[in-house]
Every structure is written in structure tokens, then in C-alpha cells.
Amino acid sequence: MLLYPERGLELNPTAADIVRLCTGEHTVTEIVERLAEKYPRQPRPAIEHEMEEFLAVLAERGLVRYER
Amino acid sequence: MNEAHRPYTLIAELTYKCPLRCVYCSNPLDYARHDREMDTETWRRVFREAEALGVVQVNLTGGEPLVRIDLESLIEEARALDLYTNLITSGIPLTRERLARFRQLGLDAVQVSVQDVVAPASDRIAGLRSFDRKLAVARWVKDLGFPLTLNVVLHRDNLGRVEEVVALAESLGADRLELANTQYLGWALLNRPALLPTRAQLDRARRTAAEAKQRLKGRMEVLFVLPDYYSEFPKACMDGWGRRFILVSPDGLALPCHVAHTLPGNTFENVREHPLEEIWRDSSGFNRYRGEEWMPEPCRSCDRRAIDYGGCRCQAFHLTGDAAATDPACSLSPHHRLVEAAREHAEREAGRPVELHYRATSR
């Protein structure tokens, strides 16, 4: 669960993996690569798509900042 | 009760005392009768019991939580339990030093309320000269590195200034702006003739808020809480009765919401006498409006019953006299006429000054 002022987001396991890697040390591409390693059965475009959508949700709420 | 009922948030109303006298205060009208405040140790135990029950967030609120001299100790306990800890405050009375101490002790976030964008209007609603001090507090919050939520309750006299409210929030560097339309319960219901806006006012404000939300995406989260007097369907009050929130009142009652103890015929237990877990699971008050068994028509056969849970029980009671009625804010409610009449009154009386009833102990 990702907690922020007066709210919380319940995360599925992949989303939780993504949040854990959003430490400021990894690029978006690196995080996708890590996920691809961890979930070898997932097609890479699907991972990229999920990553893209999820980061947008987080960014919209001001919970992450990232560059493309 | 089942997994659908798991509390995430403890609303800790540490005291009903407050130096402000806001005309829409969410405390019950008879708050002064509940003056036997719980001591530090009992609150700390309540935090531990809440955490064991699955709670992940605690809102330290009131009244004004800052008047508790043991707030430091409570923040410390919440931190030790790894609860995300929010201070919900008017900002008065506070020093920068005390706020810095809260930061050191692990307080996570601060919500500061202002009543308007200029001192005279804000102070008029608060019943106290406080606006400038509140702005100072909001700046300290940011300086000290907390996330800042700015909360502004909206009503007919400030709805026209949403643009200025947004500008104020931006100038303070707020991370979240809560534009909360007044909920007409307690003091706000008493003052409804002075507070309820017209539909035109509301629509304008909503458009302004939507534009700001779009423009500020990623920098500031703008929340516009729709007033249910002007929506077709009611809100899922508290995300449903006894589902996600436990509120503990200053004198220790465990409640599903801020004013549940104003509903007659319910029993709510005191955390001084019962463990929180037992109350959450077994309390007849908590179980009263869980699930769908209690629902009358038109809720019972309505597609939306799992979305809004029949709306607000307190609003149902305070408008119709029956806490188990469909929320009259719902356009399908047989009592919806009561809400329409209030809206018509707001249209007719728009712009005419109305006397305010300030929060006071004598009521």
C-alpha cells in the first residue's frame, strides 16, 4: 500500500515492485528491464504499457516525478 | 462483518476544544457535554489496537488537536507503529519550534485550513482573528519539509473566489488543495441558510476547480468535493458505514463517523471499556448499517447500493427523523423534496445577509 496525505493506494504486486524501484536511482527503462527479468512470461510491450500508465497515475497525484 | 469491513484510517478526535468558532464545525452541537477527555496512555493504547486491526493511517484532529499538550507523545506512538500520521489543524495555537519538533518525531503530513482568501472574510467564518497566523503556519509546514494540504470549506460567500483560493494555495506551495463544499450536518445544518449556495454559483466554482486541476496536474492535487445537495445521487458517506474508518471521539466513543452518536437508538461503546477490535466486530452501532439488510426501498433494489451504500445516515436522520431512510440528497429518495426546498430557498435568498450562529458551548 502506498500511503500519502490522508489517502492510500492499494497496489497489486507489480505496482508495488514499480514503487519500490522509484528511488530516484533508476531510469524508467531500467525499471522496465528489472520487471522483465522478474516476470519473464510477461511480454515486454505489456510491461512497458503498464509502467507507462501507472507512472502517469502516480505523477498526476504528485507521488512521483520522472522524465521520459 | 467480513473482509469488506477493514478499517484503514483512525480519525482521532483528540479534543473538542478549539479557539475557533467556525459556523460549519463538524463537531456535534452538544460537544461541550463530552468534556471527559482521554489521557495520553489511553490514546496510545487505542493507536496500538487500531494498528493491530489493520489501520495504516491516523488523522490527529479535533476540535483543535494542538491544544493537547501531549500531542508530541501521541505522534511518537503513531510513528513507532509505522502509521502514516496526519495532523489536521487550524494552525492555532502553534509555534514554529513545536512544529519542528513534530517533524523530528515523525509526523508525516499537515493539513491547514483557511476559511477564505482574505483576513476579514476568513476571520468572520472562524469567529476569531486567525487568518494571518494560519498563513504563517502553512509556510512553516512547507519550510520544514512536510507535504501541505490546504483545506478550504466552500459555501455561498466564498464559492465565487475559488480562483483566488487556488492562487493562494499555489503561492503557499501546497501539495494538495481540498475544496470541500460544506456538508450540512451539525453546525452547518444550523447555519444552512447562510451557507448553501445556488446552483449557478456551484457550477462556476466547479468549472474553475476543474481547470485548475488540469493546469496543476503533477504539481498540486486539486480536490473538489461535490456537495450532495446538488448531485443526483448521494455520496458514499465515510466510504460506507463501518467499512474503512473508525473515529474515536475525545471522550472515547468509537464511531463510524463524526456525528454518529447524534443518531438515537444506537449503542456505541467506549474504548476505555472495550478493546477496539471487539467494538469494530461486535458493536451493534457499527453493525447497524453495514451491508444491505437495513436498506429501505428505493436503495434495496437500486443498482447504486454498492456504490453509495444508501448515502449518509446522519443526513437521513437530521432531515427526515429516520436514520434508516434513503439519504434525502438522493434524487430517488421519497424525501428529496426537503433538499429541493433548501435549494429553492438558497435561490430566493441569494445575496441577502443571514445571521451566523457561531459554535458555542451553550447550544
Image: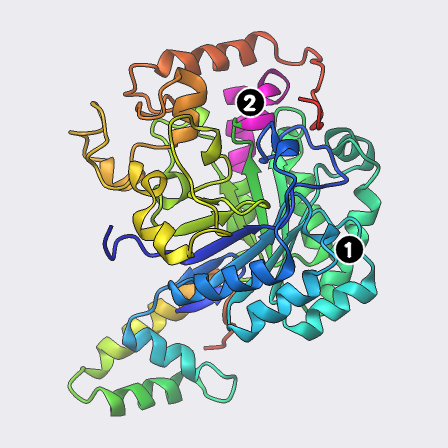
Residue occupying the point 80% across, 55% down = B94
Residue A46, given in percent of the width and then of the height, sits at 22, 76
Asked if B227 appears above or below A53 in the picture, the reply is: above
Give the chain letter at badge 1. B
Please determine whether, in this image, residue B85 is positioned above or below residue A34: above
Image height of A51 relative to B352, above or below? below
Name the one closer to the observer, B169 or B52.
B52
Magenta stretch mostly in which secondary structure?
Answer: helix
Chain of the residue displaying label 2: B
Residue of label 2: B189
Q: Write down the residue under mark 1.
A: B137
The residue nearer to you, when weighing B278 against A18, is B278
Amino acid carrying label 1: it is Val
* Corner quadrant of residue B265: top left
Please name the residue shown 33% across and 69% down the image.
Answer: A11
In the rendered image, residue B207 lying in the magenta stretch gets the answer: yes
Tell me the tag on residue A22.
none
Residue at image position (81%, 35%) is B128
Q: Quadrant of residue B299?
A: top left
Residue that sits furthest to the bottom in the current view = A37
- Residues in magenta, as a range: B186-208
In-front residue for pair B297/B167: B297
Q: Are marks 1 and 2 in contact (CB under 8 Å)?
A: no
Residue B56 in view (yes/no) = no
Q: On the rendered structure, is B337 left or right of B348?
A: left
